Amino acid sequence: MSTKLIKNAAVVVTNDPQLGEIPDGGVFIRDNVIEQVGPTAHLPSQADEVIDARHLAITPGLINTHHHFYQTLTRAVPGAQDQELFDWLVRLYPIWGEMDSEAVYVSTLTAMAEMILSGCTTSSDHLYLYPNNSSLDDQVRAAQEIGMRFHVNRGSMSLGRSKGGLPPDHVVQEEDVILKDCQRVIEKYHDPSPYSMLRVILGPCSPFSVTPDLMRQSARLARSYEKVTLHTHVAETKDEETFCLQKFNQRPARLMESLEWVGPDVWWAHSIFVNQDEIEMMAQTGTGVAHCPSSNMRLGSGICPVREMLDAGVRVGIAVDGSASNDASHLFGEARNALLLQRVRLGASALTVREAFQIATRGSAAVLGREDLGVLAPGKAADLVGIDLNTLSLSGGAVHDPLAALLLCTVERVALSIINGRVIVRNGELLTLDLERHIHRHNAIAKKIVSRHPEPERFKLV
């Protein structure tokens, strides 16, 4: 067994109501589990590895509840820069159809590297198209190499344009193929144990890209296994609401309820267009939400009613969403935008700094069904980050309230990241990936797949 001691931190933000925020604090780790948290003077003085965290704020690692890693290849693509969701998708679907295993693997590393350096230690991802023999295995390999805790989503699309859906037919799969592969990846990769580094999610993409039958069958398959959870896009845009009303005579949230897609093992991405009755239903059933503020602004979709959800008791977590609808994967930045966007709606007291931080940590952990994450306390997973408070972007803020400065100012990158007891970032440098070589490889793939589709396609779903 190995031990680590993080000591002399400017502050340790525990997220534990009993422990609070500890000045001159530290954390003692044994293997991959936190054993002690407290003032440095009260911790063991020796360990196999000692990290002096002077000038650092130590916090739980942030947790991302919704992403599309592969979209790092199509950031800022012409023809998708100024479109709302449906036209944005129609422009990008053909490009995504050019991906192969290497593209999925490389883009996953890119997204994970960016998130780790921005404070994220656990992420989910939603991969819902598998062209050219790509597979979920490509993402798993990347996660294991870079060292991120991962909830991997076997997403799916089965409703092509010829059958009334939005995606082109060549990027969808037959439903028996989808369900067979869902079972395969669960049985190959899913680890429901405490401190698990890899869990599997099932995620039919959206009401306009899968059939109701696939939604029901996916839910029943997931629930036949331990802690296999369910995730999809719900109520993201007015276009989606119109589609559901015309096709199913139900609003998106009520459609999900009728398809067995509510419960403590379910969370929805976005959930902008939900009314108060639907919010109450979500709270009563335990259905969670991945709040994606930057993506919602980028696509002009709207603002999620986070304040009302929190007041009703809905589990709410933070998410960057896809890197082609956010164009960044910066999790501290996302928590900041969540804070500011609620204030645009409801005023400066709508969401406090500490509530926003809770959404990005304990809230996200609850959404993913992880009782072992989001808190620095004995018995919790050893996932933490350290942010250097002695930087230009935090200067003048951190001296007053370090945690508030992390949300109201700018965290450029973390100085330290420990995931599952392993140091992944030290002195601001990612240790598990050669970034210079990787960026060159990623850019070459991005250029290749986009060059095959230079002209935007225009389409409106009726």
Image: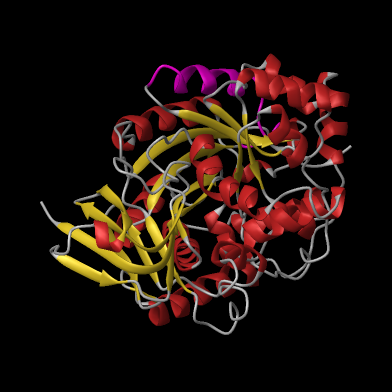
Q: Residue at x 67, y 24 (%)?
A: 283
The x and y percentages for residue 117 are 46, 68
User: In which image quadrant can residue 56 be found?
Assistant: bottom left
The x and y percentages for residue 87 are 81, 53
- Number of marks in the rendered image: 0
Relative depth, front residue between 240 and 2: 2
Magenta-tinted stretch:
205-225
Relative depth, front residue between 378 and 414: 378
Q: Is residue 244 above or below residue 86?
A: above
The x and y percentages for residue 315 are 61, 33
The x and y percentages for residue 252 are 77, 27
Q: Is residue 236 above or below residue 413?
A: above
Is residue 429 in view?
Answer: yes
Q: Is residue 80 above or below residue 29?
A: below
> In the image, is residue 401 part of the stretch drawn in magenta?
no
Q: Residue at x 58, y 52 (%)?
A: 357
Q: Is residue 245 left or right of residue 7?
A: right
Q: Is residue 312 left or right of residue 57?
A: right
